[in-house]
Image: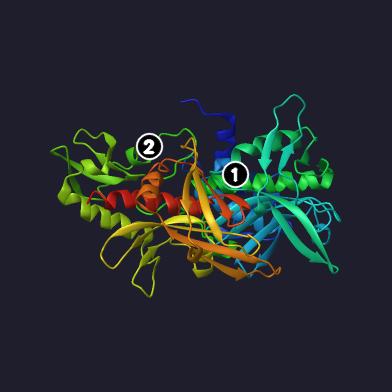
Amino acid sequence: MHVSPEMKRLRLCFSLAACFGLPLAAQDATLVPERDWTSTDGKVMRASLIGFEKGQGLFRTPEGRRFVIPDERLSMRDQAEIFMARVRSQLEVSHSADINTDFCYSKHIPSNRRSETNHSYVAFGPNRFNLSISLIEPGVDPSGYREIAVAGVAGEPEVIFPLEEGNVRRFTRNGSEQVYLRLPFFPGTNEEKLPAIEEALAANTLTFVARGGTAAERRFTFDESESNALREVLAIYRQGSALIAGGFLKRARLSEQTSDASAAPAGGSAPVTTGGADPLEPFRKSLSQKKYGSLKWNEESVDGLGFLGADVVVRKSNGEAVRVPFAQIAAPDRKPLFEKRLEEAFGDAKHVSSTGITVFHHPDWDSQRMSYSRSILLTLNPKGEYDLRLFAWAVLHGKLVKEIFIRGDTQQTPFLVACRPDDSSLRDRTDGTKNTLCGTYLNEQNSESALTLLGSKSIQFRIRSEENQDSSVNLQEDELQATLEAIALFQWSRQL
C-alpha cells in the first residue's frame, strides 16, 4: 500500500518524537496537559500541547522533546481540543454576563480601538455560535441604509446583505451615542456569503458599501490590521463551524466545552440538513442500531432508526435504510413513536401556563432566551390537543404587532398570520426603547401553511406594526431547529 510522505512524517512524529524532537525551552507554557493524542491512522502519542508554530500545534513529550503536527492529521476530538486551546491562547476573550456569552476578538484590534475601527468577533454562548463583522465610522449614523454590498474582487458579482433592524447597533461613548452596522453569520444559514469576503481579503481589496435610503453611499474600507483581524477570526469561525456540525463542540461558553462534547441532535432527529450530503448516510453508518424498536410498515417488520423532518427512517429486512411517511407506519406503532420523539426533542424543556397550556421549547433555552426567540412552537392544551403557536419580537417604537409574514426557502410567497392587539406586550430596553413581544396561535389555515416550511434551511419572519412599520429577521439556527421539530411533531399528532 502506498503511504504518502506526509503520513510517513506524521508516523515519525508519533513513534520517534523523543529521538527527533527539539529541546524544551524553559518558558514553554502548557495549553493542554499531558494526554493521549490519536492520529487519523490510529497511532497514539502521549504529549502536552505547549503552543503553536506557523498555525500548527506544538507538542512536548514526557521526555521533553518538541514537535509540530498539523490539525488535520489528528482525530476530530483532538482537533476540538486544539481548537479551544487556540481560541483561549491566541484571541482576546471577554464575557457578557447579561447573555452568558463569550466574545472572541483578534488581538490585531486592541480593545481601546473597537469603538472607532472596523472589527470582527466570534461569539460562544448558550446554544449560540456565530461570526459578526462590525462596520464603524465615528460620528456617522448609518441606520438609514437599506443594504450592504461587498465591493471586493473586480469582475465578480456583488454579494448583497439586506439590512434589517437587528443589523443596527448603538452604544454610548463619552456621553454621545455611536451607531454602527453589524453583519452576523450563523452556521447553516447565510454562510454562502462568506466566500466573497474571503476572496476580497485574499486580494487585499475588502470594502463594504452601504447604500439605499436617502443618504449617499458610504464605503467601509478595511486597513491592514482590520483585514488581518478578520482573517484570523474568520478562520476560527470556519474551523469551529465544522467541529460543531460534526458534533465535536457545543454551542456553549468556552468554560462549558469538553473534549467529548456532542452537539449532534438527540436521538435520530435531524430536521435540518446542510450542503449536498445524503441525509440517510448517518443512518447507514449505524445500521446496528435498533433504537426505536420493531415497527410495522406496509405489512413489513422494519427497524426504527430515527427521523428526518416528518419522515421516519427505517431499516428493511435486506439492510436498506429508507425514509417513509409517518402515516404509513402501522397505527398501533405511531403513538409510542410520537411519544419517544417528543421526549427526545424537548425532554423537560416545557413551560406550563396558569391555564394548563404546555409550550414545548428548545432544550437549551433558559427563561431569558425563551422570551427573545422567534419561532413556531408546539403546544398541548388540557384537552390533549396539540397546536402551533408563533412567537416573535421586534423594536416597533412602542407599537403592537398587526401581522407577521412567514416564508421559508422552500416557498414562493410568504403566508400571513394576523395578530390581535392582546397578542402583544411591551418590555423596556436598556436604551430607553421598547421591545414588542407577540405570541399567537396559528389557526387551521396557517397551520396548514406552516407544514410547507418542512424541509426549509432558512425561515424569515417579517413583523409589521399597527402603523405598518416592518422588521424582518431570519431565524437563528436554534430557532429554526425548534420550529421545524415543532411542525414535524404537530403533523404527526394529526396522524395518531
* Residue holding disc 2: 281
Closer to the camera in the image, 275 or 27: 275
On the question of residue 319 being in view, the answer is yes
Q: Amino acid at mark 1?
A: Asp
154 with respect to 298 (left or right) = right
Closer to the camera in the image, 77 or 261: 261
Secondary structure at badge 2 equals helix
Query: Which percent across, then down, holds residue 181?
Result: 74, 51
399 with respect to 345 (left or right) = right
Query: Which percent across, then down, holds residue 72?
Result: 57, 41
Instruction: Tell me how far mark 1 sits from mark 2, CA to CA.
Output: 25 Å
Closer to the camera in the image, 356 or 296: 356
* Residue holding disc 1: 71
Query: Which disc is residue 389 wearing?
Result: none
Secondary structure at badge 1 equals helix
Label 2: few (<14), some or many (≥20) within 10 Å?
few
